[in-house]
Amino acid sequence: VQLQASGGGSVQAGGSLRLSCVASGIITSNIGSMGWYRQAPGKQRELVADISSGVADSVKGRFTISRGNSKTLYLQMNSLKPEDTAVYYCNCKTYSGNSEYWGQGTQVTVSS
């Protein structure tokens, strides 16, 4: 299973970015959930948004998670803040819950 994430970059505060993630090597019926996590320097990886449960409180009203097709996931990030700076990872869990996969990460840098 491969998760290919893209769309990161450097923006000024208040700007927008759209992250994309495409899953391959897994059949649709095996996908239980997909989501986005992020990890800032010196901090633990945290959940940003999950297609089933929505977005975290810290990004509510600014970020939107959506699915293009069964294997494509997006994260629309608006009104970005410097504290959103992190490496963002796409995540996929199988329906059985037995396996979990991670993308390679895409860097998001927000300057003030």
Image (spheres, rainbow, N blue to C red):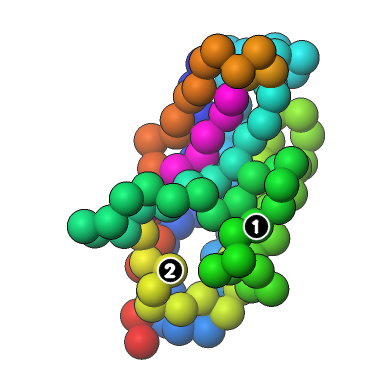
Q: What residue type is labelled 2?
A: Asp
Marks 1 & 2, CB-CB < 8 Å contact: no
Q: Is residue 18 visible?
A: yes
Question: What number is the disc on residue 55?
Answer: 1
Drawn side of residue 75 relative to residue 81, left or right: right
Q: Which of 101 and 69 is in front in this view?
A: 101
Residue found 60% across the figure and 66% down from its top = 57
Drawn side of residue 112 relative to residue 24, left or right: left
Q: Quadrant of the C terminus?
A: bottom left
Image coordinates for residue 101, horizontal then vertical, percent? 48, 24
- 20 in relation to 55, above or below: above
Mark 2 surroundings within 10 Å by alpha-carbon count, few (fewer than 14), some (14 through 19), many (20 or more): many
Q: Which secondary structure dominates the residues rendered in magenta?
A: strand
Q: Name the residue under label 2.
A: 84
Q: Is residue 76 visible?
A: no
Q: Which of 6 and 47 is in front in this view?
A: 47
Res 41 quadrant in image: bottom left
Q: Give yes or no for residue 99 being in the magenta stretch.
A: no
Question: What are the residue bounds of the magenta stretch?
Answer: 87-93
Residue found 65% across the figure and 57% down from its top = 55
Residue found 45% across the figure and 30% down from its top = 102
Mark 1 surroundings within 10 Å by alpha-carbon count, few (fewer than 14), some (14 through 19), many (20 or more): many
Q: Tell us which disc is closer to us: 1 or 2.
A: 1
Drawn side of residue 76 relative to residue 42, left or right: right
Q: Which amino acid does label 1 sit on?
A: Val
Element at badge 2?
helix
Residue found 51% across the figure and 29% down from its top = 3
Element at badge 1?
strand
Question: What number is the disc on residue 105?
Answer: none
Q: Give the mark nearer the N terminus: 1 vs 2.
A: 1
Image coordinates for residue 95, horizontal then vertical, percent? 69, 18
- 5 in relation to 102, above or below: below
